[in-house]
Image: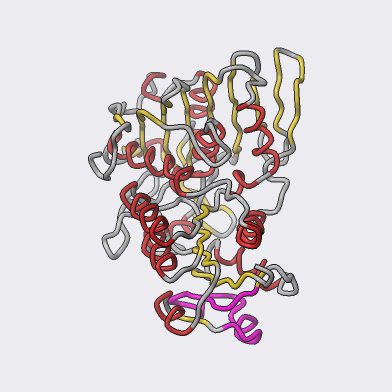
Amino acid sequence: MGRPISIVLAGLGGYGEVYLAHLLDERDDERFRLVGAVDPQPQRCARLEELRGGGVPVYQSLDDFYRHAQADLAVIASPIHWHCRQTCHALAQGSHVLCEKPAAATVQEVDQMIATRARAKCSVAIGYQWSFSTPIQQLKRDIQAGLFGRPRRFKSLCLWPRGEDYYRRNDWAGRLRAADREWVLDSPVNNAMAHDLHNMLYLLGDERDTSAAPVNVTAELYRANAIENCDTAVLRVHTAAGVEVLFYGSHASAADFGPVFSFEFERAVVDLAGGAAEIVARRGNEVLKCYASPNSEPQMKKLCACCAALADSGEIPCGLEAARVQTLCVNGAHDSAGAAVAFPAALVRVARRAQTRLTSVAGLAETMQRCYELGVLPSEADVPWSRAGRTIDLRHYLHFPGG
């Protein structure tokens, strides 16, 4: 483009604060220029005065922004149920989009975004930062090249305790529908841990910007907190190539653990031990190759990648098609499991932790780890509180609920 990329940021709270910090702290970066900020409640933003002091106008809505200005790139860091409408509006105004994960709450919304993008002839990136990282890109190239043989089974486990403050931070956390009745489906697998499910499918994609096509999903959803949706989810997905993908995640564990993953191939196993650990590929006791932690790079690499793509027509590694499969699996998981099963009251514990009240389930961490090691769902391990879900065919699934 030969000039800084103009950016409007929609969402100043939550993860939007991470984007805002980068845009304000790196304001001397000649690659971009923040030209507007959008939030219906901007007074909650800790850096509001700094934003206004820097001459950046703040608007109540994207409609207000586009009535007064334009932007090359719209960064959507709003609640999940606003992703589709705000992305489509920005595209209709001629802006390219970087939308936070997940792409949307429902697969029909993602398809609407894809259709709107095609009409607008603009790009849409989805902010799964691991997909933009060098280690994941290197690992994906090696998988595609057949370095480890055919993939057989991918599994991931994440136990992140979340307290009362997490579920009270807004009016849609832990909800199936938001106050406006739009689907939000907020849960570990559709918010904090959406990365972990998406990453497995993304690594199995045939091209740099594609994910593997899931053909079915079987899910079990549970809750300990007083919320509408689940705080614990276990999914089994099969891809069109026959790879089994297993996801284990919970906010109701007393233990803080992960994310970890283990990817099984014909000739190797690729493991991540969590935190800042390297990704290690082994054949038996022999280390074949190591990759840096996917957490070793700045999260804002995705923003820099989008700016670079607009500046020189570069490639977006994770767009709507690559992200759609996560939404597809989440929608199918809700059809599979139905309403989340409440954990037995006798196992539920409530304790003070770090200025909040944490609800957890006795023995849940051990059960999730055992199921992860065995590669089974809780109902297959005869866990007393478990309830099996039905298998949902995803091959022609176009609408949630019901396919």
**Residue 325 versus residue 43: which sits nearer the camera?**
325
Tell me where the magenta segment starts and ends, as one range.
Answer: 33-56
In this view, 274 is above or below 268 = below
- The image quadrant where one finds the N terminus is bottom right
- Residue 151, given in percent of the width and then of the height, sits at 55, 21
- Residue 362 visible to the viewer: yes
Using residue 149 as the reference point, say whether residue 386 is left or right of it: left
Whether residue 226 is visible:
no
**Which quadrant of the structure image shows residue 313?**
bottom right
Residue found at x 51% / y 18%: 374
Count how many numbered circles sit on residues in the image: 0
Magenta span has 41?
Answer: yes
Vertical placement of residue 16 versus 364, above or below: below
Q: Is residue 282 left or right of residue 97?
A: right
Q: Quadrant of the C terminus?
A: top left
Query: Residue placed at 61% from the left, 63% from the top?
Result: 18
Q: Position of residue 5 (x, y in %)?
A: 63, 69
Residue 194 % position (x, y): 49, 44
Q: Above or below — where is 302 with respect to 207?
A: below
Q: How was this image coloured? A: secondary structure
**Would residue 116 appear left or right of 44 to someone viewing this image?**
left
Residue 297 at x, y = what percent? Answer: 72, 49
Extreme residue toward the left, this view:
402
Identified at 49% across, 67% down, the residue is 95
In this rendered view, identify the residue nearer to me: 327 or 210. Answer: 210
Whether the magenta-drawn stretch holds residue 168 is answered as no
Q: Is 191 positioned to the left or the right of 175 in the image?
A: right
Q: Nearer the viewer, residue 308 or 152?
A: 308
Residue at the spot 36% in from the left edge and 32% down from the top edge: 220
